[in-house]
Amino acid sequence: MKEAARNKRRDRLLRRAFTAADGLLALGVVALAVVLDHPALGHQQSGRASEVVVEVNGEETMRLTLSEEAHDYEVEGYEGTSYFQIEGYEVRMVDSACRDKICVHQGFVSDSGNAVVCLPNRVVLRLEGQGGLDTVQR
Amino acid sequence: MGLVLQLVESSLPPLLPIPGARLGLANLATVIALFFLGPAEALEVTLMRVLLGGLLRGSLVGLALGMSGGLAAWAVMTALYMLYPSPFSITGLSIAGAAAHNAAQLGMAILLVDFTGLWHYLPYLLLVAVPTGFFIGVTARRLGQALVRYTDEGYAEIG
């Protein structure tokens, strides 16, 4: 009896590849993503940042001012050392003690409120402040 | 039952070591277990998969991330599975599961590094969940249909 009910559910789920409800669900997820990406919700702070806050496991260990000329830094994380670079009022992870190197592939970030995150090493490069580049240009 | 369980189990190891595809491939086992064996068994499969995967990777962070994602995906897919007659197909379940999986992993990641700015990645992760969930759904359907044929033949021989 219980098995028969299970097989009925199974066969119904398997019968169609894609239903109208599936489409609505997918659209709903996309809509949610778009809404969350809206400036009013997701990115309260925008524009170019002026400094980068380095956090290890949520604790601030360094606070550096973004600059035009290149500077290399390193910070000790949980798994090893993370190497990062400030250049052209942007910051990027050069190398980090992690497997997937998602943080490195992220490249340069420059907007306030943004961040480069190396989760395995628990290192966060968080951008703060306003108008690093703009102030200089004006 | 035993035959199906074995098939599900044997499908697990080759799914684990693929790092790039872990967004969805691991969920395939949960999906298959859910509608062939039931919610409780799917939970078992999910827990075992996450524990084994975590041990293989040897990372506590990875284990916590996998556990949060796996459990969230299981919970959402089970909720949709319990609807009957369901307006969704296996594809819909899979997309919902993938979205829940990614969102929960991000939530756990935020707890771990204590940085709420990570929420910036949620829209991106949700968008990614749609194609990966779709792909896993289609794959699960194919696999499911093959398994149905296989087991029905098996039952016919016994009966």
Image (spheres, rainbow, N blue to C red):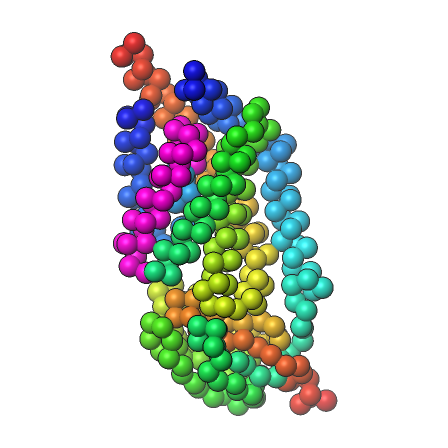
Q: Quadrant of residue B3?
A: top left
Left or right of residue B150, residue B122 in this image: right
Looking at the picture, how far across and down is residue B113, in whole percent? 46, 68
Looking at the picture, how far across and down is residue B132, in whole percent? 49, 46
The answer to whether residue B141 is visible is yes
Q: Is residue A48 magenta?
A: no
Left or right of residue A137, residue A56 in this image: left
- When the figure is inspected, residue B140 is found, relative to residue B152, above or below; the finding is below
Q: Is residue B44 magenta?
A: yes
- When the figure is inspected, residue B81 is found, relative to residue B52, above or below; the finding is above
Q: Which residues are magenta?
A: B31-59
Looking at the picture, how far across and down is residue B36, in whole percent? 40, 28
Task: Please state which of residues B22 and B111 is positioned toward the viewer in this rendering.
Answer: B111
Looking at the picture, how far across and down is residue B61, in whole percent? 38, 61
| Rendered residue at 48%/84% (across/down) | A62
| Rendered residue at 52%/47% (across/down) | B100
Picture quarter with the N terminus of chain B: top left
Q: Main secondary structure of the magenta part?
A: helix
The answer to whether residue A103 is visible is no
- When the figure is inspected, residue A24 is found, relative to residue B53, above or below; the finding is above
| Rendered residue at 67%/83% (across/down) | A131
Task: Please state which of residues A51 and B107 is positioned toward the viewer in this rendering.
Answer: B107
| Rendered residue at 40%/39% (across/down) | B43
Picture quarter with the C terminus of chain B: top left
